[in-house]
Image: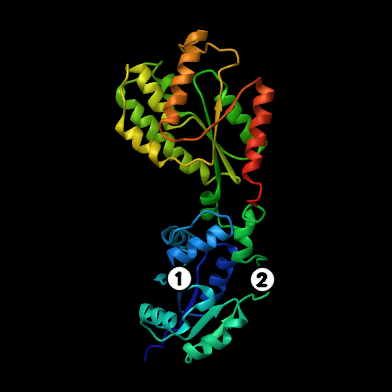
């Protein structure tokens, strides 16, 4: 006769998912043949919690993707999503237990948590299950989800890598040609010890000696958007981005006399930056063989046109001018403000 396989579950909101959760899940999985990780979510409740603790809302599907990526090669673990609309202070334990039992559909031998305070609830609603408390003192990973929400950036190393990119601040440097975007982007990335996404459009200009086709602008916008996604996963709390899709649309208009790409417009809608720094063209124009609008009148005209393109899309930006020292220091001040009261 085949031995009965032991079943257990561990649940939570995972708001956000952190290394303390990872440890508890791994420890629980060592007790049983099959462990169910149960994400309990409520859009209203979870939004309220995130707003209260000053972090952006984390949808359930995002949390599920984090858990899935982190646990993807642990064979005895299965992830379950339970939707409810209950707050902690009036949580209906009986209803919650019934939902979890219905989802697992097997006798539950063990229930796992990190709180002895749950002993009486589990004893009442899971009478045939043994409650095992894992690391209730938080000695292994010294953080709780509540503390993590309140101090995300001070506890950065306690987030799994798959979670960090969601909270990475994105700062885009924008402006017309020869205003120092690439130089400032690189310097800021070095100073903040992090990654940056370079200007993909320049790659195309160099490769094709400025002889670009209409279709290339769609590719530029797509490649640059995907590059930002990739670089965010490699960043240290902040990612710097050299140019973005509005600038791609701006250059398409310049190259092809008023042409506009609907695909680029869709990418513009998907963009999400914590800060946009607009560099004014008040430094010396440099002829690098690819630029073509160095006259003062042209620079002024193009600068105003680009600003209007951003304003027409409700993309807020902060103008920065002055010499290279001024630009760096002003930008640093703006960036540091992003982390004030959001540690």
- Find numbered disc 1 in the image and state the secondary structure of the residue it sits on: strand
Is residue 137 visible in this depiction of the protein?
Answer: yes
Is residue 30 visible in this depiction of the protein?
Answer: no
Whether 104 is drawn above or below 299: the answer is below
Can you tell which mark lies on residue 138? 2
Alpha-carbon neighbours of circle 2 within 10 Å: few (<14), some, or many (≥20)?
Answer: few
Can you tell which mark lies on residue 40? 1
Whether 323 is drawn above or below 66: the answer is above
* Horizontal and vertical percent position of residue 9: 47, 78
Nearest to the observer: residue 270 or residue 69: 270
Q: Quadrant of residue 326?
A: top right
Mark-to-mark CA distance, 1 and 2: 21 Å
- Residue at the spot x=41%, y=72% of the render? 84
The colour scheme of the drawn protein is rainbow
* Horizontal and vertical percent position of residue 205: 42, 20
* Horizontal and vertical percent position of residue 38: 45, 72
């Amino acid at each position: 006769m085949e031995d009965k396989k032991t079943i257990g579950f561990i649940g939570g909101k995972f708001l956000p998912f952190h290394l303390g959760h990872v440890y508890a899940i791994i420890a629980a999985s060592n007790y049983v043949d099959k462990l169910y990780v149960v994400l309990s979510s409520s859009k209203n409740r979870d939004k309220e919690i995130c707003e209260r603790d000053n972090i952006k809302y984390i949808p359930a599907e995002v949390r599920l993707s984090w858990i899935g990526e982190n646990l993807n090669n642990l064979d005895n673990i299965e992830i379950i999503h339970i939707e409810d609309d209950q707050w902690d202070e009036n949580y209906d334990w009986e209803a919650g237990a019934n939902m979890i039992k219905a989802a697992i559909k097997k006798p539950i031998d063990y229930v796992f948590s990190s709180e002895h305070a749950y002993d009486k609830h589990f004893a009442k609603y899971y009478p045939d299950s043994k409650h095992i408390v894992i690391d209730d003192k938080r000695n292994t990973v010294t953080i709780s989800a509540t503390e993590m929400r309140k101090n995300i950036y001070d506890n950065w190393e306690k987030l799994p890598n798959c979670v960090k990119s969601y909270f990475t601040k994105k700062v885009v440097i924008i402006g017309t040609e020869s205003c120092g975007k690439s130089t400032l982007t690189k310097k800021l990335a070095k100073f903040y010890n992090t990654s940056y996404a370079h200007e993909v459009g320049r790659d195309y200009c160099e490769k094709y000696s400025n002889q670009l086709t209409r279709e290339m602008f769609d590719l530029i916008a797509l490649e640059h958007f995907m590059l930002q996604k990739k670089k965010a996963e490699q960043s240290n709390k902040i990612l710097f981005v050299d140019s973005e899709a509005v600038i791609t649309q701006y250059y398409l208009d310049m190259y092809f006399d008023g042409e506009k790409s609907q695909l680029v417009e869709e990418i513009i809608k998907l963009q999400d930056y914590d800060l946009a720094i607009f560099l004014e063209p008040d430094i010396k124009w440099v002829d690098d063989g690819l630029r073509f609008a160095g006259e003062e009148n042209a620079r002024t005209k193009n600068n105003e046109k680009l600003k209007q393109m951003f304003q027409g899309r409700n993309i807020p930006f902060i103008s920065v001018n002055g010499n290279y020292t001024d630009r760096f220091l002003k930008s640093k001040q703006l960036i540091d403000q992003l982390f004030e009261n959001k540690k």
